[in-house]
Image: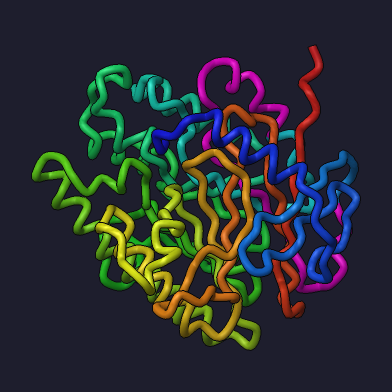
Amino acid sequence: MRRRAFGAALAATAAGLAAPRPAAPWATPGASATPATPVTPATPARVETARGGAPHLAGPDEFAFALIGDVPYGRDQVALLPALLADLDDALAFAIHVGDLKGGLESCSDAVLAQRHAALAASRVPILFTPGDNEWLDCSRLPAGGFDPLGRLERLRSLFFEPPRAPRGVSDLVRQSDAPGHRPFPENLRWHVGETVFVTVNLPGSDNGREGAPAMQAHHALRADANEAWLREASGLAARAARPLLVIAAHADPGFEREDGAHLAAPPPDGYTRHRALLRELAGTFPGQVLYLHGDTHRFRVDRPLRDTRGARLRNFTRVESFGSPFASSWVRVRVRPADPSPFFVAVRHAPPARP
């Protein structure tokens, strides 16, 4: 979880939800919500919410999935989780949880991790998970139990990735540890829905764990190499499709805004500098649309934050950030129409309160 004042995040989210903007051709209203307008060129999309049934999937190649993350934090949000999961509609192929399934001050004990795994596994819509920092990297903090972070990562791997649960309609679900080269990162996943390629990478918050004990620094370097190789491979596979679409999911907000003026003066390096440069390279040469999903800063947004080396926005790269604590009843619905020139339709949903 990035250390940021919740007041600013709440205000920004409220402004994004309330600010009126004209509708746009990429997003037609559905029964469950009025989807976000397209991000042209950089302003957050206006989102209007309403309750109702799932939007009809119009074409044979169309599908939908859910995005959640940074929940549940603490007992109160654990109690809200069943209602959130029950609100995931039957038309969804799967859901992606982009990490931080516990608060940063909660214990990282085996019991807590197993409880959160069981809670997500109870969902009737299969959930694919990518780790955040709260459940492994930050577990060395005393309030979290003072655990060895790498030991907690191994525990997560045994819970979530031995092997992961394959959703319906998904083909070729593979862990990086099973792929040629056998890099030891089973949490890095890749799968297909039709010709659309999905890929996850272990990219936690807390500056991506680039500092710390020598073992952690060595792990950071190994993980960065593995993530780059995995993303390059996924991009290459997606580029071969007749209608190339690539969806990348990770936990951390990689700080795209740090390089809004990168063509004028590069910012000091951080734990995500290499990752941003790789995304810029891959998106700049990719023949289709790229959707980037993350959590970390608990602020729902849809925009086009990535710029090329000259400072121009890459219009084939869209970022969607999930809701997160304290918005524990809200989730994002993404509809994919591969044949549409703007293939990603984003809507928000709010689960109704649980019945007493």
Q: Is residue 185 one of those drawn in magenta?
A: no
Which residue sits at x=20%, y=58%?
222
- Residues rendered magenta in the picture: 55-84
All told, the count of numbered labels is 0
Is 71 magenta? The answer is yes
User: What residue is rendered at 55% in x and 40% in y?
Assistant: 69
Q: Is residue 65 left or right of residue 51?
A: left
Q: Quadrant of residue 275?
A: bottom left
- Residue 82 visible in the picture: yes
- Report x, y in % for residue 171: 58, 67
Please name the residue shown 45% across and 75% down the image.
Answer: 311
- Say which quadrant the C terminus sits in: top right
Q: Position of residue 234 (x, y in %)?
A: 45, 73
Foreground residue among 164 and 324? 324
Left or right, 304 with respect to 183, comes to right
| Left or right of 40 in this view: 256 | left
Identify which residue, 353 or 198, lies in the foreground. 353
Taking the view exactly as shown, the residue that stands out farthest to the left is 214
Q: Quadrant of the N terminus?
A: top left
Q: Residue 99: percent from the left, percent from the top?
A: 47, 42
Q: As displayed, is residue 215 above or below residue 36?
A: above
Horizontal and vertical percent for residue 331? 68, 41
Comparing 263 with 120, the one in front is 263
**In the rendered image, which quarter is residue 178 located in?**
bottom left
Q: Is residue 232 above or below residue 132?
A: below
Residue 93 in view of the camera: no
* Most distant residue in the top direction: 356
